[in-house]
Image (tube, rainbow, N blue to C red):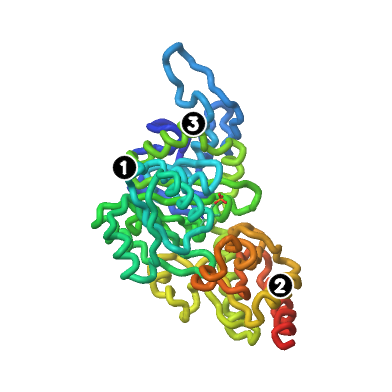
Amino acid sequence: MSQPTAANTTAANCSPASEEARAESRYDLRTVAASAGVRADKAHRAVMPPLYLSATFAYEEVGKKPKFDYSRTNNPTRATLAEAIAELEGGAGAVVVSTGMAAVDLVFHILTADDLVVAPHDCYGGTRRLLNARAKRGDLYVKYANFSDPASFDEALAMGPKLVLVETPSNPLLRITDIEEVARKAHAAGALVAADNTFLSPVLQRPLDLGADIVIHSTTKYLNGHSDIVGGAVIGKTPELVEELAWWANCIGSTASAFDSWLTLRGIRTLHLRVAAQQENARLIAEALTTHPAVEKVYYPGLASHPGHDIAARQQKGFGGILSFELKGGLEAAKRFLDTLDIFSTAASVGGVESLACNPWSVTHAGIPEEERREAGITPGLVRLSLGVEAPEDILADIAAGLEAAEQKAAA
Ligand SMILES: *Cc1c(COP(=O)(O)O)cnc(C)c1O
């Protein structure tokens, strides 16, 4: 059993930063999720890790810094979560921060003003906004590339980036990037690789095993999985990277609260169970959608027709709980579909136990010029689904009712 709050935290707010800790987790991922921090409490032998809300911790001796001294720098509850996430991703350590965007931005802090970031042209909207804003201020340079087009990617790589950002599967079309190939090429060009693993979680994909140097999470999504906090994490492959990231998180003060960390740790206990149910629901819906007359196109990496199917089958342990599809009737059909759903909430975000549906055209991607949206394959009739853990038969019936409503409009 892991004893995460035990010794050897070498950097602020991170897990044991030793090569040995990374090299091998003694237990299966499911065991790690269920047992992280269990029996680590020395004060009362609490089985489950307690929530330490204290801002500050007393020195035993003048001048002798305790392991935990101030909660911005390091907090026992946050450290337990960081150790669990690091172990799940197979990293040397993790830094737990207040949001997914804080996690993305933390990675940019290891760059200098002369450094170039190569990012996917269809990366997460918040990431694109941040990259553009930081580039505009002169904090870094950014070059966007189509990671599905080797010519586009190689051209960007030839510009000599310090960091290559990968997001796979992409949002909302679930485009798949071959992490191993990107890492091989990026390393040959002298760049670090950071992979945003938010859409799959370590249960289904471990980017460090595929050659990435850094993993980014919006823990808001699958890791917490209950849509009741916003949070983020950055996992480093080496102790040096973890130490640098932890230094910055403490310096800028973006570390997560103890309470959010405690909730996220609680969520992680059932990560593998949730993901299995969500993925099964996604598979059933994807199959039902492919044969429905109201549907123009289905995007789900689990379908053999998906262009990234083979890569996904190789680098992932499953195809995930998110899919999108295009309705023949355009925006009007999408509205009818969404308005008819009963179980699904029409809301942004993904990865929770509750099923969500959204129209990327008018919600998550509304800020992008119309022309660019269409070019990226984001059409008015596109709907993204994030499947929850509800009963498959209820979800299927809800989708069928939505499609019937959408179809009436399409026919009209
Ligand atoms: C949600 C999300 C983020 C941002 O996370 P927040 O917790 O909302 O700040 C970053 N990347 C991806 C892929 C996301 O889905």
Say above or below: 4 vs 157: above
- Which of marks 1 and 3 precedes in the sequence? 1
Residue 97: x and y in percent read 51, 41
> Residue at the location (36% across, 43% down)?
113
- What's the distance in space between the residues labelled 2 and 3, CA to CA? 46 Å
Q: CA distance from mark 3 to mark 1?
A: 21 Å
| Element at label 2 | helix
Query: Which secondary structure lies at badge 1?
Result: helix
Q: Which residue does the image show at 31% across and 50% down from the upper left?
A: 162
Residue at 36% over, 62% down: 179
> Is residue 184 placed above or below 150 in the rendered structure?
above
The answer to whether residue 207 is visible is no
The residue carrying mark 3 is 74
Residue extending farthest top: 62
The residue carrying pointer 3 sits among few (fewer than 14), some (14 to 19) or many (20 or more) residues within 10 Å by Cα, namely: many
Quadrant in which the C terminus is drawn: bottom right
Please name the amino acid that badge 3 sits on: Asn
First in sequence: mark 2 vs mark 3 = 3
Please state the horizontal and vertical placement of residue 268, each as a whole percent of the image: 55, 50
Of discs 2 and 1, which sits in the foreground?
2
The local secondary structure at tag 3 comes to loop
The residue that disc 2 covers is 335
Q: Nearer the viewer, residue 113 or 349?
A: 113
Q: Name the amino acid, label 1.
A: Glu
Where on the picture, by quarter, is residue 47?
A: top right
Where in the figure is residue 284, as x and y percent of width and height? 59, 75
**Taking the image as drawn, is residue 147 in sight?**
yes
Q: Which residue is tagged 1? A: 19
